[in-house]
Image (cartoon, rainbow, N blue to C red):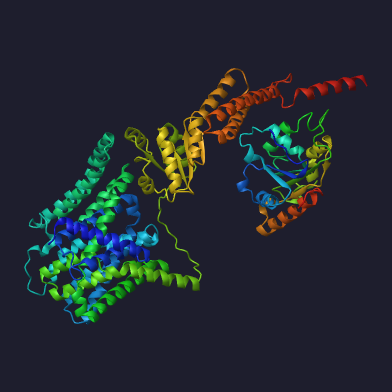
Amino acid sequence: MGRSPPATSGVLLVLAHPALERSRANRALAKAAKGLAGVTLLDLYEAYPDFAIDIEAEQAALRTHDVIALQFPLYWYSTPALMKEWLDLVWLHGFAYGEGGTALQGKRLFVACTTGASAKAYHAQGYNRFAMDDFLRPLEQTAHLCGMVWETPFVVHGAAVKDDAALKAEAERYRARLVSLMPAEVEV
Amino acid sequence: MQSFLTQTLFYLGAAVISVPIAKRLGLGSVLGYLIAGVIIGPHALSLIGAEADVMQFAEFGVVILLFLIGLEVQPSTLWDMRKAIFGFGGAQVVATSVAIAGVAVLLGLPWQTALAVGMVLAMSSTAIVLQTLDEKGLRQGPVGRAAFGILLLQDLAVIPMFALLPFLATIAPEAHGEAAGHGASLVSHLPIWAQGLSVLAAVGAVVGGGRYLVRPLFRFIAKARLREIFTASALLIVVGVASLMQTVGLSPALGAFLAGVVLAESEFRRELETDIEPFRGLLLGLFFITVGAGVDLPLIVRQPLTLAGVVIGLMVLKFLVMLGLARLFGAPLRGAAAVATALAQGGEFAFVLLTFTVGAGVVGAPLAALLTAAVAISMALTPLAMILYERAADALDAAIPDVTPETGDFDEGEPDIIIAGFGRFGQITGRLLTANGFRSTVLDSDIEQIDLLRRFGRRVHYGDATRMDLLRAAGIERARMLIVALDDREKTVELVETARKAFPDLVILARAWDRRHAYDLLANGADAVERETFESALSLGETALRKLGFRAHRAHRAASFFRRHDRRTFEELRPMWGQEEAYILASRDAAKTMDRLLAADLSRMRPGDSGGSWDTASLEQELRERAEREGAD
């Protein structure tokens, strides 16, 4: 649509939370990231309340960022519906993977995820029976298929029961992590 | 005695000069009027006399004030306030009467006279207190609520006082004639039971008439669309009720208040308020001027110390009694001090009661003159006392941080949203908003529509929303949003434009007829618009696609794409609006772009062999090729 963005810029932070106004943890994280230079925030539920995702615009945004960060609460061991819809519709064959699908090659995929349960639950002996890494496997494989670098995920466990001070500390940690991901040529 | 015109000239001239000056000096308009009255009064420039007829006319201002207050008070609110009215109010009248009487006895008055003086001075001034609180913006809070409850009970207490005072007579009654003033009623010669009956009948007539007569009358007038007749009938009701009350010996102000309460639930409330408001201001001003004119300057010169003693004693005593009571009733210190300061003066009823007591032989004429002057001066001092109180409170605030903010339980009923026009469009928006817990005030000028909506239990007010004064009465100054859904293109633009000019920060949303109207509205200051047929037409189009065989989600996406492209073009063409040629060219161009984009979307979303998966044909092709290769391996 006639847009001519810079060749590459920093982090495209794709946030999916259907009720961000009620989420303390995700709001704290988003707030920490929002002020950062080099971070483009895309709040999916705000941009596409009707799920009618604008594929061209999204693909253009993906092309112009070096780091794709996905921030979401873990819902049923997966992403919220709209983030999955966004992956399904935007990360198409011929764009993200497959023949001619090279748009994301060499970029980095970074996942920031919050969970309700404590870290202990994500363990072979815990009630979720698998480690957090296992639940993020589909995204890891997505990165692999698209030729992307899989960054170590950022996970906040027990988000619902953390007090304000603990959340603030997590937000600081998150901010530092995002800065460390920033490509060298992006001025922070 | 000058002609009516010259008199009017002096009154208006004095008001126009002194009130703005007083306001500029931060003294408030009440003080301005009072000072104007003193200056043109019989004891200074003597431009006007102390005519009883002017006073009567001026007292009508208080009547209108109480009618307007009644309009603000719904019966349920009144019931919620019963503790403030009867508990706090009753205690105030009794305690203040006793305290003042006690001091009077100590000063050597016989106990009968002392008690009469106590009752007379226990009254506060409704007009001054409410006007002052209004100007300070305190009327709606807990302070205003408490003050209002007390004033209401004082108005009620006047009735038994008229009955009680004659029993306190110690002096041979003077000429009884006009002295009865307030008590003079057509029924005063009747036996007590008949008087009681006539009072009941009058109250019944106000309540019943308000409910079953006035509303049909207003509806009839509203249909005729004659604004001045609407105003005239509003005034007619106030005057009529006031005269009726006077006939049966009740306070006209109380009657007007009652009529206001009866009409508070009606759809005409806002329009009535707006129509009568200007009269209130002017007549109250006149009232304050006459009070000022009544201040007996020679008396002040003759007995300055005595008078000062009485005034200060009166105000300090009333302040202390009220402060103690308010604390006893659980008010926080600041609120209690504010109420006590506001109500520490003598009231307009004191003038009436004093004349009455002189006539009845309870209080001697010289004492009555002294007290009249003292009451008038205390009224004049009230705005000053309020200023002093605020200074003191601010100083205290600065010293001690306020840890217990006043908890106002008064439901101010301020709307979040004002909806102008409640026809087919406004109703849907309004329902969505109220269903989500937002308070809305609705204005509509179609009386049949209002009738219908009221039968469904909706709260709708009658009135032309393009009138700024009506919008103000509806609370637009405190509302967060104005939604314009009028059934008139021109009026919609006009309202958006005037509202934007008057309230730069208000969010204004408007219903537009079509694209051109939408651009017009945006150009005139609307924050957002919605073309009235756009969404519903789109929705029908989506249904059509479904009926033509599209699956629901695909039809929905097609409609969503169309919406997005249309909105985008709408924004892109917006700068061209007003330049006819450029606009037409650009819009032709945009239409072509849209067709192309929609076609692209459609071809991508066309169901493939696998029955409409999100994946595109290219993937299927590749998968087939890979399967063949693997099969060959």
Q: Nearer the viewer, residue B522 or B156?
A: B522
Q: Please name the residue shown 32% across and 54% down the image.
A: B78
Q: Please name the residue shown 22% across and 82% down the image.
A: B106
Is residue B429 visible in the rendered image? The answer is yes
Left of B15 or right of it: where is B245?
A: left
Q: Nearer the viewer, residue B384 or A21?
A: B384
Q: Quadrant of residue A93?
A: top right
Left of B524 or right of it: where is B567?
A: right
Is residue B364 visible in the rendered image? The answer is no
Q: Quadrant of residue B32?
A: bottom left
Q: Nearer the viewer, residue A141 or B622?
A: B622
- Would you place residue B295 above or below residue B145 in this image? below
Q: Please name the residue shown 64% across and 48% down the image.
A: A23
Q: Nearer the viewer, residue B432 or B289?
A: B289
Residue A40 image point, x, y percent: 71, 45
Residue B328 image point, x, y percent: 37, 69
Residue B385 image point, x, y percent: 34, 70
Quarter of the image for the N terminus of chain A: give it. Answer: top right
Q: Which residue is at the far top?
A: B548
Q: How many marks?
A: 0
Q: Which residue is at the far right?
A: B633
Residue B222 image point, x, y percent: 28, 37
